Amino acid sequence: MRDRLAKTIADICKDLFGTDVRIELTRPEEKFGDFSTNAALQLAGKLGTKPREAAEKLAAKLREDLGDQVSEVTVAGPGFINLKLSDRALFESLETAPAQRYAGQEVLVEFGDPNPFKAMHVGHLYSYIVGDAIASLLETAGAQVKRLSYHGDVGLHVAKALWAMQKSAEPPKGDIGRFYAEGAQAYERDEQAKAQIDALNAQIYANDPSLKELYDQGKKLSFDDFDAILKTLGIRTDRRYLESESTPVGMEMVRRNTGKVFKESEGAIVYEGEKSGLHTRVFLTSKGLPTYETKDLGLAELKHKEYPQVALSVIITAHEQAEYFKVMLAALGEIQPELAKKTKHLSHGFVSLSSGKMSSRTGEVYGAGELLADVAKAAKKQFPNSARDMQLGAVKYAFTRHRLGGDIVYDVNESISLEGNSGPYLQYAHARARSVLQKASN
RNA sequence: GCCCCGGUAGCUCAGCUGGAUAGAGCAAUGGAGUUCUAACCCAUAGGUCGUAGGUUCGAAUCCUACCCGGGGUACCA
């Protein structure tokens, strides 16, 4: 509808004034109409005529050419042309399918990315909800979307959790996050524990078989926990990548390109981002160990191998990684230019709670599951019969109603409110509207 | 220090590829209705659009400087 109108207006401008104009059709305040264009203002600027005169001429022609599409064409203010759609056009637009910009194309969307052996916190929840929404949007635009996630299954955080699991008398079960929290605290406070954890970390890197059983237990526990939360959220993941997969691929890429893309500096292998206005980052440490950037390079290559036909690859993370990704993508751009061009990093801010609740009693971060449970509790209290869908709608809407970029504040009570800017409000409005329609047709 | 993001009504946020008196929800104040799932309705009040310059016929929107908050800034992720 919008595109068709814009084209008609552009054609008329060309006919009448012999000039090409980039037509902007905006949604003005309701009282002005359904669409509004500043085409006449643009024309006046180009031709040096009075805006209102150009607007009147344009409007007259539009009334003629648009026929039953519009019920009103008016000129207002300095020379805006306001269009009011006819009922017929309005109904037609309802039946028009959305634009299929990515029709039939494969698109990857990576989001969520919680690390096993740690709790999934509200930041991950934000990433999952935003990422899933973006994936759905792309699906609506016709894309064949693959939802991906990436998980750090090796590293110091694993050692911290394993250390606490080893010390525990009982077999590990339930919330894995508490083991991590215990290990992380000991690592900070206790020199002896720190040494033990560092040793454990080396063992993990060396794939020590004596750790395998505990490691596998912990990993399973983590992913079972993630799965439960994702099931509640109704979010699926098509492919999970692990750091242990991407690491060898990335190391190979860095080695192959050392001397070309990467440089040796102070014993480490680095990428000098300064040449593209960024900063230098280490890819291989002086001990020869891969950093996150190398692993991400490998991940990009892994995705490329499995999905060679992608039109677009989106990665969604928190804001803290924004500049890191610029450097990583700049390096990738020198190795695989076409791949880097198709990769787009989007970042979101941090979540804070209006209640001020950020960490639970143990000093861990506020968990994703914990938030979901708190919402369910608050919803049940206010609306004893509230459905799961209502709670989910509340959380998802509260997290997606903001523009991406800034930090967001989450307020449980506001999110479950039946009034105002909330998910349940929309759901209720929808239900009522359908009810009215149904009764009208009986 | 340098780089990135944010700074709009008491609160949470839209608007930021320049355009019509800066909008919404919540909260506040004053009213109306007792119901077809009332998703409420009407009205009032509330804003130096972080600050100061600049560009423009026109700036919340573009440019510059500065202030405040968050993040990043070589061997963590």
Image: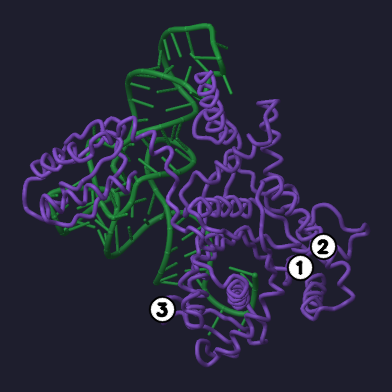
Chain colours: A purple, B green
Measure how far apart labels 1 and 3 are at the Cα level.
35 Å
Q: Position of residue A242 (x, y in %)?
A: 70, 69
Q: Are marks 2 and 1 in contact (CB under 8 Å)?
A: yes
- Rendered-image quadrant of the C terminus of chain A: top right
- In this picture, residue B67 sits left or right of residue A354: left
> Residue A20 sits in which quadrant?
bottom left
Which amino acid lies under the numbered mark 1 shown in the image of this protein?
Answer: Val
Q: Are marks 1 and 3 in contact (CB under 8 Å)?
A: no
Asked if both marks, 1 and 3, belong to the same chain, the answer given is yes
Q: Position of residue A171 (x, y in %)?
A: 91, 58
Q: Can you say whether A151 is above or below A224 in the image?
A: below
Q: Position of residue A122 (x, y in %)?
A: 64, 50
Q: Residue at x 67, y 87 (%)?
A: A287
- Rendered-image quadrant of the N terminus of chain A: top left
Asked if both marks, 2 and 1, belong to the same chain, the answer given is yes
Q: Can you say whether A1 is above or below A390 in the image?
A: below
- In this picture, residue A172 sits left or right of residue A416: right
**Mark 1, secondary structure of its residue:** helix
Asked if both marks, 3 and 2, belong to the same chain, the answer given is yes
Q: Which mark is residue A158?
A: 1
Which amino acid lies under the numbered mark 3 shown in the image of this protein?
Answer: Ser
Q: Of the residues under marks 2 and 1, which one precedes in the sequence?
A: 1
> Residue A186 sits in which quadrant?
bottom right
Give A304 or A391, whichever is nearer the viewer: A304
Q: Which mark is residue A276?
A: 3
> Residue A213 sits in which quadrant?
bottom right
**Mark 3, secondary structure of its residue:** helix
Q: Residue at x 11, y 39 (%)?
A: A56
**Mark 2, secondary structure of its residue:** helix
Q: Residues within 10 Å of mark 3 (few under 14, many from 20)?
A: few
Q: Residue at x 73, y 68 (%)?
A: A153
- In this picture, residue A243 sits left or right of residue A442: right
